[in-house]
Amino acid sequence: MQYRKIGRSGIEASVVAMGTWVTGGGLSWDGVEDQESLRAVDAALDAGVNFIDTAPGYGWGHAEEVLGQALKGRRDKVVIATKCGIWWQDKRGSFHYHLDGKDTYISLRPDTIQIELEDSLRRLGTDYIDLYQTHWPAKEPDLTPIEDTMACLWKMKDEGKIRAIGVSNVSLAQLQEYHACGGVASDQFRYSMLYRAPETDILRYCKEKGIGTLTYMSLEQGLLTGKVGMDREFKKTEFRSDENWNAWFKMENRPKVLNMLAGWSDLTEKYACSLAQLVIAWTAAQPGVTHVLCGMRTAAQAADNAAAGGLHLEEADVARMRRDAVLLGTPA
């Protein structure tokens, strides 16, 4: 496993990080067994992963509770990242979406952030968070000024309740404003070989400013593992059934991706790796990328994904994979 610093925070974390969106369960992921989630955490840690990302919004606190249970007695061995800003306790903030029977709001107000932090600490069974991130930027009508949000986060850092401040899902302008308010350690955003938009601005800025990056959906929700074939169907309640969210899952687009992956059989043989490991290693090799978040539903997935953290691809192979991905164009 390779380890890299999270920006200028001084916190060293595994290049492959465990994402726990699926750990929260619910209709969006067609359910998940908590015992298997616990085994997945064990497998990830055994394979050298020391960086786990979660959020209160993953199963309305359930992912944090499962993670807290998994880390009992070994909190000091793990870098925990969680978030604030997805709020459902009342109508403070700006309406975001209705999910699994709950109305959710985006609230980056200091009063709700303080409540969220204490709730996360309790669920995780810890007295500090290593990396505390804003989950989504504030929006109208309750558009909390970034300087107010950052003042609250810096107060929490001064109190020792968080070690570093991060953001996620922000535009370049928002990232610049956050960074101007005392600096941020990291930025989390969607990025993969099929979704390279952040290369035009976010990745470049983060590299220039020494900001750590946490990429998510780098396996395109499993599509880039080669295991989602043409016969795979998803329930209407699952995220992967929403073609507006990820058009690559459309039946007319899947063959393009599957054919590209099939063309890399010589690479998986050369590096003695799985397709998932190859794609994760490619992502980690991109300029500006420091950490890659991977969902790990099972212990087997956790062990497989984690092994990518020790994989080093030759530059020519990295370039070849990029060319193949570019040739796919944009999904119909």
Image (cartoon, rainbow, N blue to C red):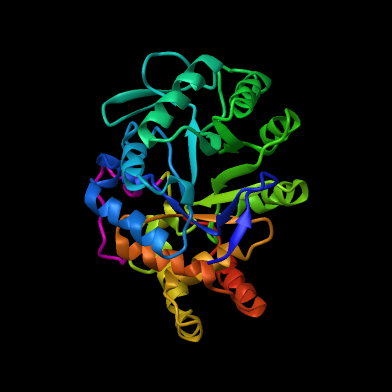
Residue at 45 percent of width and 13 percent of height: 92
**Is residue 95 something that shows in the picture?**
no
Residue 179 horizontal/vertical position (percent): 72, 34
In the image, 98: left or right of 107? left
Count of labels in the image: 0
Residue 248 horizontal/vertical position (percent): 43, 56
Residue at 61 percent of width and 21 percent of height: 152
Q: Can you say whether 42 is above or below 76 in the image?
A: below
**Is residue 192 something that shows in the picture?**
yes
Q: Is 265 part of what is drawn in magenta?
A: no
Q: Can you say whether 22 is above or below 120 in the image?
A: below
Residue at 37 percent of width and 21 percent of height: 88
Residue 172 horizontal/vertical position (percent): 69, 38
Q: Quadrant of residue 283?
A: bottom right
Task: Report the magenta residues as a range.
Answer: 228-243
Q: Can you say whether 60 is above or below 197 in the image?
A: above
Task: Report the magenta stretch's main SS.
Answer: loop
In the image, 251: left or right of 34? right
Residue 264 horizontal/vertical position (percent): 48, 79
In depth, the one of 58 and 265 nearer the eye is 58
Q: Quadrant of residue 245?
A: top left
Residue at 64 percent of width and 73 percent of height: 319
